[in-house]
Image (spheres, grey):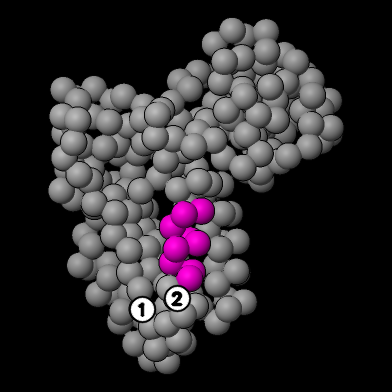
Amino acid sequence: MVKIEFLGPIGKAPVEMDAKSLADVAQKLKEDEQIKAWLPKCAVALNDTMVSDLSTPLKDGDRISILPPVCGG
Amino acid sequence: MMELYDGPLDVKEIFGRWLDEEAASNYGAYIPFVGTIRAEDGIEALSFDIYEPVLKAWFDAWQRRALERGAVVKMAHSIGDVPVHTSSYVSAVFSPKRRVALELIEEFVEDFKANAPIWKYDVKNGERIYAEDRSTPMDGAGLLQ
């Protein structure tokens, strides 16, 4: 199982799922209409490191963060 | 050095302390930046969420980039509500000569706006409203779409 956290304004509780890669996570998250709308605008971190490859393999216990558009300062 | 505070920043204390910290470091230039909350659109305050682990990684990468140019970057940011006319963000660059500091402060502040994992909300009538129209997707956004 991997854990998905939705940061900032997304306002959704973390979910757990079976996934072997980020592509699996993408497929499952798109089944949630609320989250699907956020995905084109969101960046992704795996265990607190930003990632850019959908084929990134996942292992049991991994933590994936969904980061919506930012505005610091 | 990265510092996070609940509520508005004590700008004078932070800048004074940073000046003292580098007093003997032989830097010829110290360029501070202050972000102050403006009264506009009827807001009482801005409010901020921060994801600290990714912010720390982002800042550490900038610290390394600055070091390669002989410079040091520092920043402080607020978490939670920050009333109008107070400050939520300060940063500074110290470098041996002014040119590097002038360039770095611009690059650092612009990348901060684009990629630091901080979310801003307007506070109106005590309600927090995500500042969606002023927010920017981070580098790599859309990976899971």
Quadrant of residue B134 in the image?
top left
Q: B141 and A56: which one is in front?
A: B141
Is the stretch drawn in magenta largely helix, strand or loop? helix
State the residue at coordinates (44%, 63%). Answer: B106
Given the image, what chain letter belongs to the residue carrying mark 1? B
Q: Residues within 10 Å of mark 2 (few under 14, many from 20)?
A: many
Residue A3 visible to the viewer: no
Q: Amino acid at mark 1?
A: Tyr
Camera-side residue of B93 and B16: B93
Q: Is residue A71 above or below residue A27?
A: below
User: Where is mark 2, residue-wise?
Assistant: B101
Q: Position of residue B57 (x, y in %)?
A: 58, 54
**In the image, which residues are magenta?**
B103-111
Tally of marks: 2
> In what element is the residue under mark 1?
strand
Mark 1 burial class by Cα count in 10 Å: few <14, some 14-19, many 20+ = many
- Check disc 2 and report its element: helix, strand or loop: helix
Nearest-to-viewer mark from 1 and 2: 2
Query: Are dots 1 and 2 in contact, CB under 8 Å?
Result: yes
Q: Is residue B144 left or right of residue B11?
A: right
Q: Quadrant of the N terminus of chain A?
A: top right
Badge 2 sits on which subunit? B
Q: Residue at x 27, y 70 (%)?
A: B15
The amino acid type, in three-letter code, at marker 2 is Ala
**Image coords of residue A66 (percent x, y):** 59, 30
Q: Which residue is mark 1?
A: B30
| Image position of B22 (left or right of A7) | left
Whether B67 is drawn above or below A30: the answer is: below
Residue B41 left/right relative to B144? left
Say the numbered circle drawn on residue A14.
none
| Residue B108: x %, y % from top left | 48, 61
Q: Is residue A7 magenta?
A: no
